[in-house]
């Protein structure tokens, strides 16, 4: 009778351990697949940061972001991929298309002609990708192309 009870206990223990091991293997595979997907997403494309100038409308910010992408491509020599869909998505929720969790906010002041200054806040994620750039307003909207060039110079040569 004791032998039957021991066999039943061993059988239950073996089944329990087997199920536990199967669960751990499944969990490990799922975690690795998630990690690989995140790693692949990080290496797929470099996103141009989204610009947020306070005194401009959403459409003007989108146009400046496109201009920023063009200037960045010219000055850096790197070919970056940018799409209106990505820009719109990031305008509503900055950083969601980049799989990173740790962000740091860096502040810089870019002097323009005369007394005008741009206070630049750059949001960087853990991959080194600049997610968005928020800035104070320039004196006039005609200054923004100059501002974009100065921002790119500061980011490329810091």
Image (tube, rainbow, N blue to C red):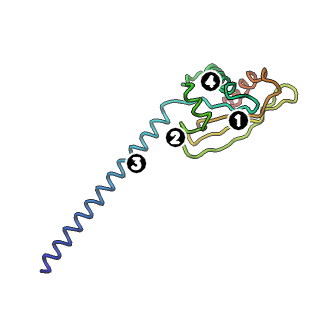
Give the quarter of the image for residue 109.
top right
Quadrant location, the N terminus: bottom left
Q: Residues within 10 Å of mark 4 (few under 14, many from 20)?
A: many
**Residue 117 pos. (x, y %):** 82, 32
**Would you say 26 lies left or right of 69 here?**
left
Q: Nearer the viewer, residue 110 or 83?
A: 83
In the rendered view, would you say 68 is above or below 27?
above
Q: Look at 16% across and 76% down and name the residue there.
A: 5
Question: Alpha carbon of mark 1 to alpha carbon of mark 2: how far?
Answer: 21 Å
Determine which of the numbered discs, if any, sits on residue 9 in the image. none
Q: Circle 4 sits on which residue? A: 69
Question: Alpha carbon of mark 4 to alpha carbon of mark 2: how far?
Answer: 21 Å
**Residue 9 pos. (x, y %):** 20, 72
Q: Circle 1 sits on which residue? A: 134
* In contact (CB < 8 Å): disc 3 and disc 2: no
In the rendered view, would you say 4 is above or below 133?
below
């Amino acid at each position: 009778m004791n032998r039957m009870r021991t066999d039943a206990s061993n059988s239950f223990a073996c089944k329990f351990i087997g199920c536990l091991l199967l669960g751990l293997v499944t969990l490990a595979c799922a975690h690795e697949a998630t990690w690989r997907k995140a790693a692949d997403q990080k290496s797929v494309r470099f996103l141009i940061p989204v610009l947020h100038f306070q005194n401009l409308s959403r459409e003007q910010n989108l146009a400046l972001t496109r201009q920023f992408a063009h200037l960045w491509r010219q000055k850096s020599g790197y070919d970056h991929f940018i799409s209106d869909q990505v820009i719109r998505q990031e305008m509503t929720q900055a950083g969601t298309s980049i799989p990173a969790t740790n962000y740091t906010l860096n502040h810089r002041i870019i002097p323009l002609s005369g007394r005008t200054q741009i206070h630049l806040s750059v949001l960087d994620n853990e991959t080194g990708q600049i997610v968005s750039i928020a800035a104070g307003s320039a004196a006039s909207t005609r200054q923004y192309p100059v501002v974009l060039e100065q921002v790119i110079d500061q980011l490329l040569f810091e």
